[in-house]
Image (tube, rainbow, N blue to C red):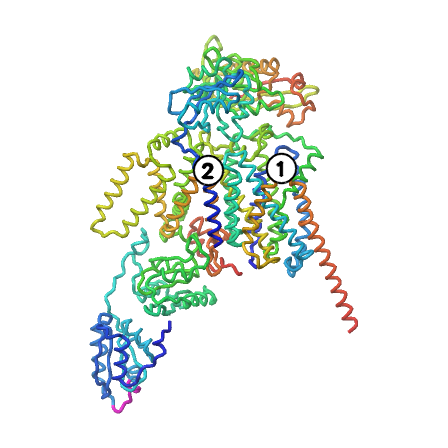
Amino acid sequence: MKTHLHTVPIIPELEKNISKIKEISGGTSELLFNEVNISGIHCCLMCCEGLVSTAVLTQLVIKPLMELELDSVSPKGLLEHVNSNMMLSIDRPIADNYGDMFRLLNSGFIVLAVDGADYILAFGAQGHERRGITEPSGENNLTGSHDGFTELIRTNMSLIRRRIKSPHYVQKLIVTGDTSQTDICICYMSDRVPQHLIDRILQSIENIKLESVFSTGYIKPFLEPKKKSIFSSVGMTERPDVLCSKLTEGRVAVLIDGNPYALYIPKLVSDNFQTLDDYNFKPYFGTFIRWLKYAAFLLALLLPAFYVAVAVHHPEMLNSTLLLILADAEKNAPFSITAETVGVLLMYEIIKEAGIRLPKVVGGAVSIVAGIIIGDSAVKSGLISTPLLTVAAISVISGFVMPGLSQSISVLRIIFVICGGIWGLFGMSLCASVVLFNICSTEDYGFPYTAPFSPFFGKAMGDTLVRTGFRKKQEQNFTVEELHEQN
Amino acid sequence: MKTKKIIAVLLLSVTLSGCSGSSDVRNKAFIKEIGVDYGETQEISLRTFGSDEVIKGNGKTLLSAVGDCENTQSKNLFSGHLEVFASSPANIGNNLLTLLSNNRISPSCYVLCVPENAVSFIDKEGGKLAELIRSSGRNGIILPRTISGVLNDLLESDRKASVPVQKDGRLTMAVISPNELIGTLSEDESKGLCWLHGNVKDVYLPIEYDGNTTDFYIRKSNTKITAERSGDKINITVEIKINGNSDDSNKNSAKAVEEVSKTISALCSKTIAKTVTVMKADLFGIERTIKSARLTNETEWEKIIPLLNFSYNIKIAQ
Amino acid sequence: MSKIKGSQLFALLISIRIFSVICMTDLTNANSMAGVAVSTAVQILAVTPMLLLYKDSSFSLKKEMLFGKFGKLLYILFFILWGAVSFSNLWEVTKSVYFPIESSFTGAVILGAVCVYTASLGIKALFRASGLIVGLIGISLIIMLVGAYPKAELTHFIPDADFSGIIKAAVRDFCRSGELVMLFILCELVPKGKRKAVTVFFTAKLILTELIAAVEITVLGKIINISDFPFFTAGAFSQPMSIQRADSVYMILFTILCVLTATVQITLSTMLINELLPDLKYKSLITAVLMLAVSSALNITQFDITVLSGILILILAVAVPIIMYIRRKFHENKKDNSSLTAVSNA
């Protein structure tokens, strides 16, 4: 990511150089300037307070530089000597413009400017406060690892590298965002991913004109197809083990500095129903759980709408016992069943959102208000019927089984309810057709979202409809490239 | 812009669709039993689920009579869960056709013929008719018939069907045509009818031998009717396979088995004599069996009847 | 141009066929079953010229269409007519089977709007969706078979087919096989596996049609003669559980197949209109409106379209490919002769 500062070369005169830096930085307080003489040459050590490790700065940079005594060395010669012969840090980039220099300074590097040299030398000495590796909060599991990505891109890169030691695994760092200068890492297996895909992804990221990139949500729209789709064809995960399994299938991952979520391309519809736990259980149980998830998806999306459609338009589908229970429960409700259902679902969404946003200290109070007061009292007062509340609860809980689809399910569910309430099963079928066609039209970089269901790919069915055992799987060596549709 | 236009069309359709007029489950009363008497008009009485009230109405047609019943109600009447359709024999064929069209009711709704005053019957004795019909069927007394089965039989070439009938406070079987009651079967003939249709199970058959009266337990049974040509005649063999045992301590008694075979053959024979020979009704799909096997060129059932020879083969496994 | 797999072509064609079977009112006896078998055999022969035409990988229908733009216009008119038939089927079914809409026309308009949207998503989405819809068809048929098994009586089927009845039924079935014309256009999008897809399609078409006919006849018996749409009636009778009615489920299958069929017509029409009038805007919308208009006209006038569709299928799916094949062979022979002459002169 090039800014106008990248076109401004470093001023060799140290005093002017320092003035220029202060001018560009606006006199920011955390930028520290230490003017010293090294081997008789006037130099300046610069760093951002709070981003560097004081111990590294003192012991490994300042002390050796202060002890350096070279005879008759030129400014460039001094820098050459420090760079080649002293090894003050493993990471020693050089910058010849203010754009690169500021990026290094703001990334926790110590910068050495020498009077008379038109470039600077930087030393990697990051030591800022960081969150430790903890269990991911959004993706739980029983039998897998308990470490998750953090906000630091380099930590995340190391978490992946620890798991994939193959030399074919490549991590490419690029910078994006004029203002934020955010580090982005493209990760892929070079023996499984075709170069044209990498080039297209890199091109998509380079076409981003945002001035700041703080989260995966900023990058995601640029990696997804332009056509509006209901479900996202770019996946997101907080788990290194999950990401590694995607990488070994030939997908490309994108890490963003400052965000603990990694993106992976392409995402297929079947990915929403797979968890790493499936592969730790016996195949029959893994298959059972997978089918349970497919059923949960249908329940989450269609159950409230089905309830409304049947209650309003198709009561013959219920047997007489169930029908009487329903009629009895609904007889005192003041609103139409459709309005009641939409209201209950919206209430659940509000409670869910409140649960995410509220401060921990009031969490208990909200649970009491939501569960007991709203749920219990509303039913007792006759505002809402119990069967409806049960149906809505089952639907909402089923939606939690696939967190990746929860956004789409939340909205689609309400649309289905409205269609079912107005036009019954006919309306639901039309709505389902729209959703189905929309899903089928979703594709990312030539990978259809509905693969391997459609276009059907039998080899991949062993990991979608069922969970094949590893003895069989080891012979298959499936990669997503086989699902790619050439245009 | 294109999307907006599509949405506009859809929204317009919502307003035009009149969907606001639809009633949901709380505004519906679900009909459980209907009793119909056909005279100058159709008089009906009906019972709904969850209520002991009997609603009465009349009209030129069945549907207009139901509409008349609705006028006295605050709720719309819904017939999708109808369990029993009790009707006088007159116009029963047309009424069944009306009910089955547009899938208004479940095809497995029971039919009950009430020769005298079906309306009053529903009023006085309605409420649990479906359970009564089912339990009588389980005991092998009558053969529960559904609307779809009765209508199918009425559309065959003989235009006759068997239905349970309410007579003298009891349930037995009768033979009807689309507009009249042809005749009623006796208790034995009704039992024979059940055996000929098959699926008699979990019943006790009383048998007499060696001066003792005992019960033979029928666990399950299966009836098959086959036809084959023999010269000018067509031999109809009724094969009934029974799995059961005698209640007698001597469970392997050959005599008990023989007696069961005789009893069942006698029941079936009585039924065939009454229904086929006297009433000229084909209640067992005999004509279809004959035509499927291409055993005759005759197209009229009444001309086929004289060609038929019936025999009964009862096989009992204990 | 988008490339489609052979299996996707099969899925699309069989879905369209099943929709036609669901809407059939005369699959009621041995004549019709035998007629379907004869018609399928005739259709296999009929599509042979188009398969031979496409055997040559250099053949491009876009460039070599008979009569050029006029030929394409004929196909457009056929697809508009076939789309109108789909809407007419919806119209007729909603009159006999309970659909929760106030009027059939409103239902057709809403369905038309949905089809305009689904057509705008492209032909790849259409083919992928058909692959998934085939799964839905399979599940529905299994439910129907499970429910029908205890209620079916083989004696309801009377093998009394006669020659004239079979021929009439075969002709009627041929006149309803509009998917042959769609096959001719869609084959261009399938680079590999056309023959296998077509073979499997005709086999599945025969098996599924006969299976559905057998279920209808054996379950319904004589009721089939008074039933407006035997498929729905058989579905209502084939309840897997006696206490539960599930016939409304077939409404879901019908609606989705209706959307798919209409979308195919709109997509194919739009594809061809694009070649004739590339600057025309809102092609899908115009096509859908035309289909609705024709459908309304057919319903109001109660015009029986069987004969007209049969003639069009004969022309567009049989005669045109034959003529194009002969013409192509003629030109190839001419080229070979002229090159031979050039060589001998040299």
Q: Which residue occupies the foreground of this view, B60 or A413?
A: B60
| The residue stretch that appears in magenta | A71-78
Amino acid type of the residue tagged 2 in the rendering: Gly
Q: Nearer the viewer, mark 2 or mark 1?
A: 2
**Residue most toward the top?**
B211
Q: In the figure, A102 relative to B5: above or below?
A: below
Quarter of the figure that contains the N terminus of chain A: bottom left
Q: Please, which chain is the residue tagged with disc 2 on? A: B
Query: Do discs 2 and 1 share a chain?
Result: no
Q: Which residue is mark 2?
A: B18
Q: Tell me whether circle 2 and circle 1 mark residues in contact (CB < 8 Å).
A: no
Image position of B67 with respect to B171: above or below: below
Q: Which of these two is toward me, C299 or C177? A: C299
Q: Amino acid at mark 1?
A: Gln
Question: Quick one: A460 or C93, which is closer to the camera?
Answer: C93
Q: Position of residue B83 (x, y in %)?
A: 45, 24
**Residue on which the image places disc 1:** C302
Whole-number angstrom distance, CA of label 2 to CA of label 1? 26 Å
Q: Residue at x 59, y 57 (%)?
A: C274
Residue at x 65% of width, y 23% of height: B228
Badge 1 marks a residue whose secondary structure is loop
